Image (cartoon, rainbow, N blue to C red):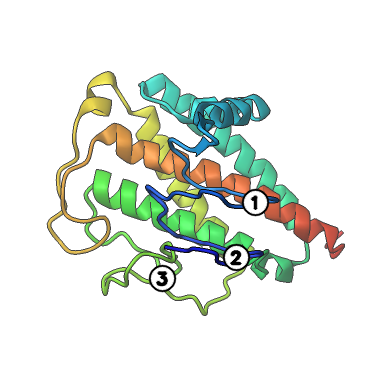
Amino acid sequence: MFDDTYLVGARFKNVALKGARITGSQVVDVDISGEVERLTVNGVDVTDFVETELDRREPDRARMRPRKPAEFREAWDILERRWAETVERARRLDPELLHERVDGEWSFIETQRHLVFATDAWIRRALLGDPSPWSSLDLPHDDMADIPEVPRDQSVRPSLDEVLELRRDRMATMRTVVDGLTDDAVESRTTPVTEPGYPESRDFLVADVVGCIINEEWYHHQYAIRDLAVLESRGRHTG
């Protein structure tokens, strides 16, 4: 319990605050981002308001919650288009800037590496059954425990073209998956992969597995364009 504690300027990252209570406190100039459910401010649940406002600002966001095959394909169409535009935007920057982190978040290239990992984990392993789908450039999320079978080399600095070659391959795999979805397939479950790795060896609902990648791609794209705006303001462009 924090009581009569000075937390001005405090920064919380990757923390679990389920069930937390803040009472009798000054909550001023506070910025919250993350997975928000049942958030109550002075007795008012503001969760629906926040979700509605986010959807209003970004109409495509509502399409990132697909459950039917056609909805998955529509969501992936949007993501392919958005990433193509954003990659062209990134190419106009000094290549070194694509390795820079903004406010401690992943660089543009680290983001691409993480999305390769996510597709390897959830699509190639969990859905398609490849027990070891990894690239040496895969980058798991920071809070994932080390798993001997899964690469995590944070020291490498691949070029944009190197990571985009992997991204094109993984995005093509995802395109094949969503194009092949049927009503029955969406409601079916995956066959567990018995070999150790990530995710764990169990079955998953196909809609959840494919939806996981839709979610990852959407949010990491949002983070990427946010940080690209900061990098662009530094004024180092290739032409």
Question: As drawn, which residue projects farthest toward the left?
Answer: 194
- Mark 3 lies on a secondary structure that is loop
Quadrant in the picture for the C terminus: bottom right
Asked whether the viewer can see residue 49, the reply is yes
Please give the label number shown on residue 30: 1
Q: Earlier in the sequence, mark 1 or mark 3?
A: 1
Q: With respect to residue 94, does 112 lie above or below?
A: above
Asked whether the viewer can see residue 92, the reply is no
Select label 2 or label 3 by which is in front. 2
Q: Nearer the viewer, residue 172 or 192?
A: 192
Q: Position of residue 209 (x, y in %)?
A: 31, 40
Q: Which residue is mark 3?
A: 136
Q: Amino acid at mark 2?
A: Leu
Q: Position of residue 100 (x, y in %)?
A: 68, 69
Q: Position of residue 233 (x, y in %)?
A: 84, 58
Q: Residue at x 38, y 42 (%)?
A: 212
Question: As drawn, which residue projects farthest toward the bottom?
Answer: 155
Q: Residue at x 46, y 44 (%)?
A: 35
Q: Which residue is mark 2?
A: 7
